[in-house]
Image (tube, helix red, strand yellow):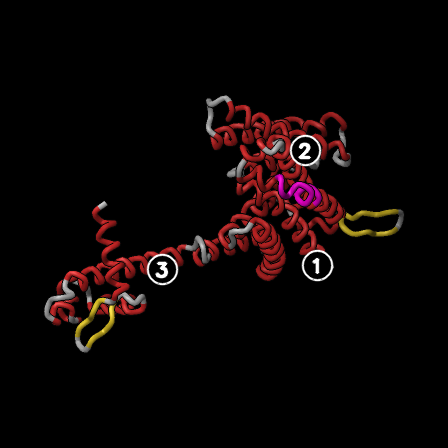
Amino acid sequence: MPIIEIIVIGCMVASTAALPGCFLLLRNMAMMSDAISHSVFLGIVLMFFAIKTLHSPLLILAATATGLLTVIITEALISSKKMKKDAAIGFIFPLFFAVAIILISKYAGQIHLDQDAAILGEIAFAPFNRFYVGSMDLGPIGMWIMGIIGVINVGFIGLFYKELKIATFDPALAASLGLSPRVLHYGLMSCVSITCVGAFDIVGSILIVALIITPPATAYLLTRTLRHMILISVAIGCCCAVLGTLLAFAIDASIAGAMCSIAGAFFLMAFLFSPHHGIVQKIYNQKQQKVQFSAILLTIQCYNHQHSPAFETSMANLTDHMRWPEPFAKKVIGRAIEKNYIIKKGTHFQITSFGIEVAKNAIVASEC
């Protein structure tokens, strides 16, 4: 069934893109995938003008070379100290892409090399481009292309995982250990270029950028381990392919657009509810810190009045003296009791020996 093949191809594209995407994200080079995915179009166009056919592996080689050229020129501009990274990326890939569009519009208007299809892609057509050996149908060509590229990416990352990890987080340490961060970098960029080229004809440049960046970015919010980040990003990418395809068929919409929307929804949920970086968790932590800080203030208050009449440390006097609303005061008192800073004695509160130490340390810290 075409829908099954679309889902399989989408999962293969997503998982293949997520592998190098994790390292791009950690190296703060996520938008380099956008530059490569657009600039490879120029390599395809130039090679087409040279060989006059769209069915040659030379197109893939030319596109990959153009992707690497984009990286080299961009990094040369950055190294010159004349342009920042975002400015260099923003200068090079629109230039290459614009030249490709002009060449197509001027000299290839009657050829099936369309800029709209290149940008947006249409994965729904991928199952119709079959791979035959004699009379034997071996499935969509896109499935084989992404399978081979996936093996290349898995092989490269699996073979150089430790080296990539060290070079990503500490390039100076990698160099001191005798590794070559520059070689590893261009090896990774080659994987990104090949992935963008392979997915270019299948899903277009927009979706491949979304699949390289968004699943790893979502996984980054959900874990602190690189290995887990890679596995989670692959799983999220596959979920985007499956759910996006089903959603697109259900509402009769663009499959690429639906996949991107699902990827965005996953990222939004992680952005809000991530246990490490989520907005909701940060708000909760801030409130807990406020309660904890107030509990220490309460402990200092009890410490200063430990020899005063009992009324000084009663609930009514504490809420009035500290000017806390009663619900908040109950939370603070509950936290102080839970931490064993104070104990309840009838209608008032008494500081514990542990609370005395906490109060003394807090007073000393405030005076430093």
Split into 4 quadrants, where in the image is the N terminus? Answer: bottom right
* Segment tinted magenta in the rendering: 155-163
Q: Is residue 78 above or below residue 274?
A: above
Residue type at mark 2? Thr
Q: Say whether marks 2 and 3 touch (CB < 8 Å).
A: no
Q: Is residue 3 above or below residue 141?
A: below
Instruction: Specify whether 363 is left or right of 129.
Output: left
Alpha carbon distance from label 2 to label 3 = 47 Å
Residue type at mark 3? Tyr
Instruction: Specify whether 149 is left or right of 232.
Output: right
Which of 311 and 262 lies nearest the eye of the viewer? 311
Q: Of circles 2 and 1, which is in front?
A: 2
What secondary structure predominates along the stretch shown in magenta? Answer: helix
Tell me the number on the disc at residue 284: 3
Q: Which residue carries the number 2 mark?
A: 64
Whole-percent x, y for residue 48 in the image: 72, 29
| Residue sitting farthest toward the left | 309
Whole-percent x, y for residue 281 in the image: 40, 58
Q: Helix, strand, or loop for circle 1? A: helix
